[in-house]
Amino acid sequence: MKVYKFGGASVKDAAGIKNLAKIVSEESDNLVIVVSAFGKTTNALENVLKSWLSGEGKYTDLLDEVYAGHLLIIKELFGQESEAKGKIDVSFALLRDYLLTVKWGKYDFEYDQVVSYGEIWSTIIVAEYLKSNHQEVEWVDIRENLLTDDRYRDANVLWSESTKRIQSIFDFRKERIYVSQGFIGGTADGRTTTLGREGSDYTAAIIANMLDAECVVVWKDVPGILSADPKWFPEAQKLDEISYREAVEMSFSGAKVIHPKTIKPLHNKNIPLYVRSFLNPEGKGTVIKFDATLRKIMPVFIRKENQILISILPKDFSFVMGDNLSRIFHSFITHGIKVNLVEASAVSIDVCVDDERAKIDVLINDLKTEFAAVYNDRIEMLTIRHYTPEAMTLITEGREILLEQKTRSTVRFVVRQIERFNGSTA
Ligand code: ASP
Ligand code: MG
C-alpha cells in the first residue's frame, strides 16, 4: 500500500479536488489518502477562534465565510443536493454549537477543538467526491485512531496504542481507498489535538510507518524539492533525489517543502518519500530515500525569516558550559521554544529562535535572576548546504552578518532582515 498526501494548496477549489480524483484513479495499489484543510481554511479558523475568544459576536460572520467557501466547492462538485452537503451541515452545526455553549478554557486546548474542523470538512468532501466517481472509499476519523498525549497544538503521538488502532482500521478488507485527516489526532479521553501547523506531512509519515507502506507521495504545487526557494533564487534547480539526512537538515534549517518531523518515521522503516507536482503528475519529482546521493553536489540555499538572536550571559561571569547550559536549555524546552542555532563562548551563549515574543519574554523573565539577556530582532538565518565560496558571497554580499557558523557541510549566517531581498545572481 501507499500513502498519498494532499496539502491545502492542492485542494483549494473544486478543480483541485477533481485533479486529486484523477491522480487517485491512476493508482491501482491500496491507498491511504491524507488530506489537509482546503486552501487557507486553517488560517481562517484561527481568525474565527481569535474573534470568539475576544468575545466578539463577529466570529459568526467569519465562520459563515468559511462555510460559504465549502458550500461553493460542494455545489461545483455535486450540484444542488448531495450527501456531502448534509454531512458538512451536520459538522458545521457541531462547531457552531460548541462555540455557543462552551465557556472557553485554555488557548491551546480551544485552538485544537476549533481549528481541527478544517480537516474534517475537507476529508468529508474529498471522500464523497471519490465515492461519486465510483471509487471504493471509506472515510476514517483519525481522531479515534491516532492517539496523542494532551500537549495541545503540539501533541505527541502515543505510538503503541495508535499502531494497533491504525493497523486495524486501515485493513483494506472492504475498501481499497481510505481518506483521512492530516494534522489532527485525539487523546484517549476523546479530545481533539493537533500536531503543529503544517503537520499533515507528519501524519502521512506516521501512518506509513505503522502500516509499513511501500512509499509516501506528497503532492505539491512545486515540481519537487528545489535547491532554493524560487521566489528568492529564480535559478533554483530541482533535486532528483536526496537522503533522509539531507531532507532533515534542509527542513530544520527552514526549507518549507516538508514538515521537519516527517522524516524520522520514514527513515526508521526505510520508506521512500516522493515529492511530486499535482500540476504535472507525470513529472518525477524528488525522492527522499536512504541511499540517495545529491548527484552533482550543488549548493542548497535555505532561508529562515523572522528570527531573534538572544545572547545569554551568566551574571556572575561563570562559564556558560556545564550546569548553566543545562539550566538554559531546560528553560527553552519548558517554554516550548525551539532552538534553531546555538553558538557558545566562554561566558555567553547565542541562540537563534523563531520570533515568538510572548514566549521569549517569559523565558527571559524566568532566567533573569541568574542571567543577563540581550537580543537582536528582525533578523534571518541563511543556510547553505554544500557551500562554495561563490555561494557564500552570493547571499552575504552587502549584508550585515551578526553570526557565522561553519561545519564541513553547512554554513549558517545570521543577518539583519531587509525588507526586499534581491538575491538573484549578478
Ligand atoms: N491545515 C494545517 C495547516 O495549514 C495542516 C497542514 O496543512 O499540513 O497548518
Ligand atoms: Mg494547510
Image: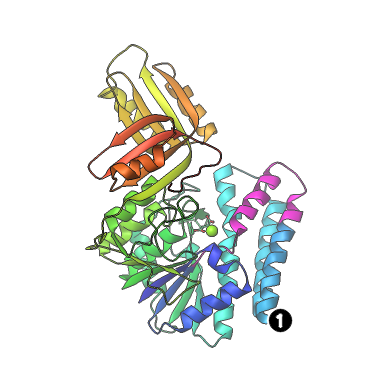
Q: Please tell me which residue is depicted at 39% across the width and 55% down the height of the picture.
A: 157
User: Which structural element holds mark 1?
Assistant: loop
The quarter of the displayed image where residue 161 is located: bottom left
Q: Please tell me which residue is depicted at 44% across the width and 19% down the height of the picture.
A: 368
Q: Please tell me which residue is depicted at 24% across the width and 63% down the height of the picture.
A: 292
**Horizontal side of residue 276 vs 359, given as left or right:** left
Q: Was residue 187 drawn as part of the magenta stretch in this picture?
A: no
- From the image, tell me which residue sits under label 1: 79
Q: Residues within 10 Å of mark 1 (few under 14, many from 20)?
A: few
The quarter of the displayed image where residue 332 is located: top left
Report the front residue among 393 and 319: 393
Q: Was residue 44 drawn as part of the magenta stretch in this picture?
A: yes
Secondary structure mainly formed by the magenta segment: helix
Q: Is residue 82 above or below residue 354?
A: below
Q: Please tell me which residue is depicted at 33% across the width and 55% down the height of the picture.
A: 247
Image quadrant of ligand 2 equals: bottom right
- The N terminus - image quarter: bottom left
**Horizontal side of residue 286 vs 85, given as left or right:** left
**In the rendered structure, which segment of residues is drawn in magenta?**
35-62
Can you give x and y, in whole percent of width and height, for residue 14 in the image? 63, 74
Residue 338 in sight: no
Can you give x and y, in whole percent of width and height, for residue 289 in the image? 28, 64
Report the front residue among 385 and 237: 237
Q: How is the image coloured?
A: rainbow
Toward the top, the furthest residue is 316
Q: Is residue 197 above or below residue 239?
A: above
Report the front residue among 169 and 399: 399
The quarter of the displayed image where residue 90 is located: bottom right
How many marks on residues?
A: 1
Q: Amino acid at mark 1?
A: Gly
Residue 38 in sight: yes
